[in-house]
């Protein structure tokens, strides 16, 4: 086993744990701010845009496709999971676009991140979703590179660590998004 194979997965898990801790801090801050501002009767409850729910479908379907691709490797049929990866990438792009559409819905409803019309609830909503969006954008870049490598024939039934790592990171982002969506939907 190469040195890269021995270190790649633990490094990915450390990175994902770090990202998870950052979101734990953000959601904890949200809870504290909400509790404090509700006590003063100045917290604004915000309905989440439908685009956020549609983006959830996109990220879930993309994970399902990546899993199907991994199973293709396990079958050792000689077929690469390139098609699954391409479709997952398209759905990943749909996720990030739908998030932007969600923010547009918020601004159309006069909910702002900052400025004279902003509220703490709106600012928290933007910070949490934007921070995830930045990680999802990184995930889309990873999926793009992985798709390119698969197109070049770099992954085989015996050697597909890059595909596996990209899939694990993307699944993590999907699970994290579901957590955030439920958190924001129920603690608005």
Image (cartoon, grey):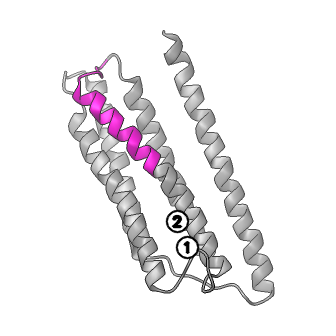
**Is residue 140 found inside the magenta-colored segment of the image?**
yes
Residue 158's x, y, as percent? Answer: 33, 16
What's the mark number on residue 185? 1
Q: Quadrant of the C terminus?
A: bottom right
Residue 84's x, y, as percent? Answer: 25, 40
How much space separates mark 2 and mark 1, taking CA atoms? 6 Å
Q: Which residue is mark 2?
A: 181
Residue 124's x, y, as percent? Answer: 63, 70
Name the element at disc 1.
helix
Q: Is residue 170 above or below residue 98?
A: above
Residue shown at the point (39%, 46%) measured from the top left? 140
Residue shown at the point (72%, 69%) measured from the top left? 31
Horizontal side of residue 115 vs 150, given as left or right: right
Name the element at disc 2.
helix
> Magenta segment, which residues?
137-157
Instruction: State the residue in front, 9 or 118.
Output: 118
**Is residue 155 found inside the magenta-colored segment of the image?**
yes
Q: Is residue 175 above or below residue 184?
A: above
């Amino acid at each position: 086993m190469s040195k890269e194979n021995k270190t790649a997965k633990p490094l990915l898990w450390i990175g994902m744990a770090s990202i998870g801790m950052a979101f734990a801090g953000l959601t904890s801050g949200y809870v504290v701010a909400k509790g404090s501002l509700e006590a003063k009767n100045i917290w604004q409850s915000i309905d989440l845009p439908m685009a956020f729910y549609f983006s959830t479908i996109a990220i879930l379907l993309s994970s399902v496709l990546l899993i199907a691709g991994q199973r293709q490797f396990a079958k050792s049929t000689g077929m690469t999971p390139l098609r699954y990866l391409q479709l997952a990438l398209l759905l990943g792009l749909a996720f990030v676009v739908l998030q932007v559409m969600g923010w547009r819905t918020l601004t159309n409803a006069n909910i702002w991140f900052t400025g004279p019309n902003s509220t703490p609830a709106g600012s928290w909503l933007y910070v949490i979703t934007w921070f995830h969006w930045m990680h999802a954008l990184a995930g889309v870049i990873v999926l793009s590179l992985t798709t390119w490598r698969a197109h070049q024939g770099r992954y085989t039934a015996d050697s597909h660590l890059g595909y596996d790592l990209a899939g694990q990171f993307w699944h993590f982002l999907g699970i994290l998004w579901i957590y955030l969506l439920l958190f924001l939907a129920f603690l608005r």
